[in-house]
Image (cartoon, rainbow, N blue to C red):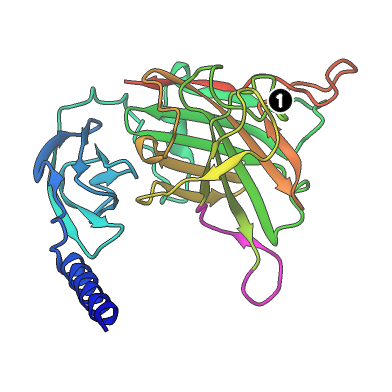
Amino acid sequence: MKANKFFAIALAALTLMACNKKDEPQAELKITPAQAEVSVGATVQLSANMEVTWSSSDAAIAGVNDKGLVTGIKEGEATITAKAVKSNGMATCKITVKAGGVTPPPAGADISVTDNSIDDWKALPAEKVASCECPDAAAYLGLKGAAVYADAVYINVLVEYDPEEIVDRSWTPFHFYFNTDNSDATGGYGDQWNDANTDILMEGAVFAAPEEGGEGVPCEYVPEVFAWTGEVGGTGWSWEGLTIAAPFCTSQHVGNFIEFKMIRELIPTTAGWNDNEFGIGFDIQQSWESVGILPIEAATEENPNGHTVKLQVKINK
């Protein structure tokens, strides 16, 4: 009888402890700072007192990555929202973007990907554009040439493809391979290029089949982003998907050209961006086999696949 009484008291005490623990008030989500000013092209770091996801009310004015780093894109105001991962908590930060933080780019550098034209590339100073072409004797001919213009905010890319090589358009993968920190001490995956230093891979379709059959049509490039997780200089499928906190890429098709515009700081990377230079490579596939690789050299007996290093791009400031 005494044992039963003791058991009942102990059970009641445990129940009370559980209830008190459950009823404890949850910590209030707070982000710091609660408001901030940032210049166009500059960044400001937000922090939270718990694990959160980040979003922007207007990524065209101020974008935010998955680490809470806010980048000023153009003048205006935007609200950055943090949502708690393990509760319903939510907090906001008002961001005011002002001009004057970045040296204005050269005339013609404001490249549009909504005008159905690529004429704006002709206005760019040639010395500020990194470019590469596919030689006639290359092993992979699907991509004919590429040009890259990067400034303090954007990475602009123009790629020309060969329509005779791109025949299966039900879902046509296009890849960007970045050496974001411009270092050989990080990254891997050296199948396409001599320098095995890719730390970020982007994959998405540039042609996709309509919902009801028929040949694939040009589509908006909405890539997934992956970080290299294998050994430095290694190869294989050692990739981990990263969270994209805000839209960072837009594109348009103009004839046999595809134009891309990306907000550099919003591309999540575990290696971090070099402030002055980065490496980039391109790949287009049919049935998951490469038919176009840039940059590439002519095929030779010693180098049958035309392996070379990635295109080096200097950031114009």
Q: Amino acid at mark 1?
A: Ile
Magenta run includes residue 72? no
Q: Camera-side residue: 238 or 155?
A: 238
Q: Residue at x 41, y 28 (%)?
A: 272
Residue 35 horizontal side relative to residue 71, left or right: left
Residue 136 horizontal side relative to residue 37, left or right: right
Q: Camera-side residue: 113 or 175?
A: 175
Residue 201 drawn above or below residue 277: below
**Would you identify the image quadrant in which residue 194 lies?**
top right
**Would you identify the image quadrant in which residue 301 lies?**
top right
The percent position of residue 256, horizontal first and vertical second, equals 63, 46
Q: Residue at x 61, y 42 (%)?
A: 175
Q: Which residue is mark 1?
A: 296
Residue 114 drawn above or below residue 147: below
Q: Going by the picture, which residue comes out furthest to the bottom?
A: 1
Residue 128 drawn above or below residue 123: above
**Would you identify the image quadrant in which residue 240 lies?**
top right
Residue 6 horizontal side relative to residue 96, left or right: right
Q: Residue at x 60, y 53 (%)?
A: 205
Could you classify mark 1 by the number of other residues whose Cα lies within 10 Å: few (under 14), some (14-19), or many (20 or more)?
many
Report the span colored magenta.
210-222
Magenta run includes residue 211? yes
Q: Going by the picture, which residue comes out furthest to the front?
A: 1
Residue 209 drawn above or below residue 212: above
The percent position of residue 102, horizontal first and vertical second, equals 22, 25
Q: Camera-side residue: 249 or 131?
A: 249
Task: Give the quarter of the figure containing the C terminus.
Answer: top left
For the stretch drawn in magenta, the main secondary structure is loop
Q: Camera-side residue: 263 or 181?
A: 181
| Disc 1 secondary structure class | loop
